[in-house]
Image (cartoon, rainbow, N blue to C red):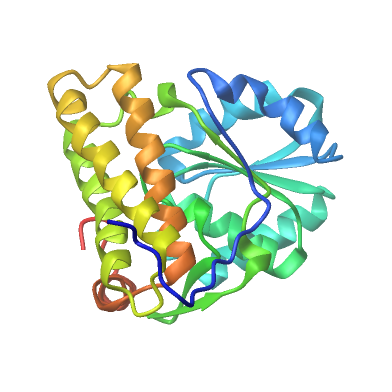
């Protein structure tokens, strides 16, 4: 049966999205395609080595590495990162990591309009939405602005192949929750429903294979595909009750978003 509705609207944005094993090695070319030459690399403290690896791949187009991204995007850290971006005269940011690093890249873009390249290492899906949650004095506020959408997303299955199974399952369930919410969202439409179903199907097919063999690159790639679909649909229909509760509880009590 067709999902057609007589009246609906679909908002799309021009984002370059690439999938492939080892794709991070193309990051320098992507920086160049953006017309940029001074990239600031972002990560959380635990992923600082990965950030340095990405900086090495960017080569002489990398002008700095900022490794202080934190959960729920504290505004104080964003302000420090913006100051550093000005100091090194960055003309783009490359965020490598999960939702925390992606959030920092978005927050910087909101304030500076710098173009972003995101290289996800989890299934957070934040890179595919125009949603940004920021925390100040223990209070998390969420906004939606097309300015925070990245210009490029590089999904490299090798970067999630070492994600521990427990974190993999937690992150995947978070992504799947995005799609589940989209199925009952007030502003759902036929396109969002198809995206949600395909995203759930991708996780249904690939996640058991990842659990059985965590370094299965093919299965990891399919889960990243699912994460992109689930994030994209969240960006189209917005947050419903479950996701809003997660943002509120996580920001108020400093709880990890995916686990919440």
Q: Position of residue 33 (x, y in %)?
A: 81, 34
Vertical placement of 33 versus 66: above or below? Answer: above
- Looking at the image, can residue 73 be seen? no
- State the residue at coordinates (35%, 59%): 193
Please state if 206 lies on the left or on the right of 113 as rendered. Answer: left
Percent across and percent down for residue 85 are: 75, 54
Residue 176 or residue 140, whichever sits in front: 176
Q: Quadrant of residue 52?
A: top right
Q: Is residue 233 visible?
A: yes
Q: Position of residue 196 (x, y in %)?
A: 33, 54
Q: Residue furthest front?
A: 1
In the rendered image, residue 70, in percent from the top left (x then y), is placed at 44, 57
Residue at the spot 24% in from the left edge and 72% down from the top edge: 242
> In the image shown, does 122 or 66 lie closer to the viewer?
122
Which picture quadrant has residue 65?
top right
For residue 172, side relative to residue 45 (left or right):
left
| Total tally of numbered discs in the picture | 0
Figure quadrant of the C terminus: bottom left
Q: Residue at x 82, y 32 (%)?
A: 32
Q: Which quadrant is the N terminus positioned in?
A: bottom left
- Work out whether 21 lies above or below 170: above
In the image, residue 163 sits, relative to residue 144, either above or below, namely: above
Q: Is residue 28 above or below residue 99?
A: above
Residue at 60% across / 65% down in the picture?
A: 107
């Amino acid at each position: 049966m067709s999902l057609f509705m007589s009246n609906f609207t679909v908002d799309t944005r021009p984002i370059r999205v690439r999938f492939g094993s080892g794709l991070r090695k193309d990051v320098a070319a992507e920086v160049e395609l953006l017309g940029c030459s001074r990239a600031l690399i972002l990560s959380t403290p635990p992923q600082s080595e990965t950030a340095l690896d990405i900086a090495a791949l960017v080569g002489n187009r990398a002008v700095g590495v900022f490794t202080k991204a934190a959960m729920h995007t504290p505004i104080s850290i964003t302000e420090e990162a913006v100051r550093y971006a000005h100091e090194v005269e960055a003309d783009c940011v490359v965020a490598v990591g999960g939702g925390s690093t992606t959030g920092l890249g978005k927050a910087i873009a909101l304030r500076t309009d710098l173009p972003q390249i995101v290289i996800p290492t989890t299934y957070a899906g934040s890179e595919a939405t125009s949603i940004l949650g920021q925390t100040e004095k223990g209070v998390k506020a969420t906004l939606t602005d097309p300015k925070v959408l990245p210009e490029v997303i590089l999904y490299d299955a090798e970067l999630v192949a070492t994600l521990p199974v427990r974190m993999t399952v937690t992150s995947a369930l978070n992504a799947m929750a995005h799609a589940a919410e989209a199925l009952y969202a007030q502003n759902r439409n036929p396109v969002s429903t198809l995206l949600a179903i395909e995203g759930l199907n991708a996780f249904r097919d690939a996640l058991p294979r990842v659990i059985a063999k965590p370094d299965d690159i093919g299965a990891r790639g399919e889960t990243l595909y699912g994460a992109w679909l689930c994030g994209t649909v969240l960006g189209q229909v917005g947050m419903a009750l479950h996701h809003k509760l997660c943002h509120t509880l996580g920001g108020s009590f400093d709880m990890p978003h995916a686990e919440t």
